[in-house]
């Protein structure tokens, strides 16, 4: 029996490794990997993806664009979307673009087996097939970025239900930053706009930090309309505190579930209203000397709403996080 050409298309080494490990035993497969949608589409055109495991949020060409190109070109392939973006609208869109199935990250092996069977790929009973790359070592940044990717998708799905919108998800940035580099990252997030920032501390099993959620002031009137509230400056802090508690809590909960810990959160506080980024840095310079920084920039489709979430883990949390993620990295 000829091996089935299977393509795994995901920008994360960690995600590709997880999928390789989740493949059922006894499958006759010829596996190709692609790190973005453009390379994935080329592989499909070359006959290397009779079945495709496709991520949605990728550089150069995302999963939606790949699905649209497959339809437009009439390519002979079956696509199983495997994504951290679990918004109901995301599922509806990919199925409308011809996907055979949708699985949330990290893929459950039983659900993956069922999805592959829908594509006509069944185990032969001949024992496990060695998959190239399944045992490759993964660096910490990639492992943690994929953990954050899954968590931010769950947080976005919750926010999408509250606001009745579609949240456009970015590729999260994960870096260890000195205070000067953090200043530049925050300045880039500001993009010339004034901000209202909410700060919330968190801690769990020796892992601690601060979440900083920055709302562009131009987004506030649209945000109030989505919440069916009259926009008044006197009530905007309460609105943003509620949204911050929801988004920060959901994101940290998603991280915690994957690394088996529970975060305790302080009460969110308004750090600055209509402030320039220099003011926020001045207020907190003593706390931000070096940090593991996670940056997520959310947008709401069809609205002028943009907000940036920064998770700033303390320098001493890094070793503990590496220990928690060691089973993923090896």
Image (cartoon, rainbow, N blue to C red):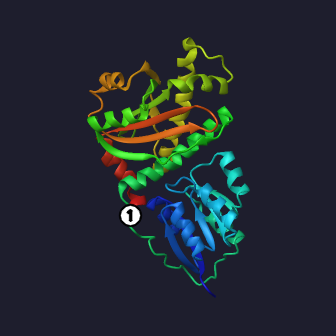
Residue 175, x across and y down, in percent? 35, 46
User: Along the line of sight, which residue is nearer the eye, 114 or 262?
Assistant: 114
Crowding at mark 1 (Cα within 10 Å: few <14, some 14-19, many 20+): few
124 up-or-down from 69: above or below: below
Residue 188, x across and y down, in percent? 39, 36
89 up-or-down from 281: above or below: below
Mark 1 lies on a secondary structure that is loop
Task: Tell me what residue is drawn at x 60 percent, y 68 percent.
Answer: 52
Residue situated furthest top in the rendering: 234
108 up-or-down from 26: above or below: above
Residue 190, x across and y down, in percent? 42, 31
Is 74 placed left or right of 83 in the picture?
right
Task: Tell me what residue is drawn at x 59 percent, y 84 percent.
Answer: 126
Is 104 placed left or right of 148 in the picture?
right
| Residue 58 is at least partly visible in this image | yes
Task: Tell me what residue is drawn at x 37 percent, y 53 percent.
Answer: 141
Residue situated furthest bottom in the rendering: 1
Residue 293, x across and y down, in percent? 37, 41
Quadrant including the C terminus: bottom left
Task: Tell me what residue is drawn at x 65 percent, y 16 percent.
Answer: 230
* Residue identifier under label 1: 330
Quadrant including the N terminus: bottom right
| Residue 24 is at least partly visible in this image | no
Tag count: 1
């Amino acid at each position: 029996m000829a091996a089935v050409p299977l393509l795994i298309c995901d920008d994360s080494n960690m995600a590709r490794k997880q999928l390789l490990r989740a493949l059922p035993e006894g499958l006759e497969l010829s596996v190709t990997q692609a790190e973005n949608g453009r390379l994935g589409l080329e592989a499909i055109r070359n006959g290397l993806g009779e079945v495709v495991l496709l991520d949605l949020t990728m550089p150069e060409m995302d999963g939606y664009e790949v699905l649209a190109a497959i339809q437009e070109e009439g390519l002979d392939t079956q696509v199983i979307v495997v994504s951290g973006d679990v918004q109901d609208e995301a599922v509806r869109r990919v199925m409308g673009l011809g996907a055979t199935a949708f699985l949330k990250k990290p893929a459950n092996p039983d659900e993956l087996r069922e999805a592959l069977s829908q594509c006509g790929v069944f185990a032969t009973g001949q024992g496990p097939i060695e998959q190239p790359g399944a045992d490759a070592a993964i660096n910490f940044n990639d492992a943690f970025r994929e953990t954050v990717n899954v968590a931010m998708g769950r947080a976005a799905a919750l926010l999408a239900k509250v606001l009745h919108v579609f949240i456009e998800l970015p590729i999260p940035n994960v870096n260890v930053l000195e205070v000067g580099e953090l200043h530049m990252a925050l300045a880039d997030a500001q993009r010339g706009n004034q901000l209202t920032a909410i700060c919330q501390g968190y801690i769990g099993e020796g892992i601690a930090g601060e979440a900083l959620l920055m709302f562009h002031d131009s987004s506030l009137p649209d945000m109030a309309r989505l919440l069916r509230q009259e926009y008044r400056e006197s009530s905007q802090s309460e609105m943003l505190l509620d949204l911050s508690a929801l988004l920060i809590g959901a994101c940290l909960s998603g991280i915690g579930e994957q690394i088996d810990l529970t975060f305790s959160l302080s009460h969110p506080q308004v750090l600055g209203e209509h402030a320039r980024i220099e003011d926020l840095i001045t207020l907190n310079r003593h706390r931000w000397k070096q940090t593991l920084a996670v940056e997520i920039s959310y947008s709401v489709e069809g609205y002028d709403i943009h907000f940036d979430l920064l998770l700033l883990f303390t320098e001493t949390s890094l070793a503990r996080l590496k220990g928690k993620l060691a089973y993923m990295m090896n």
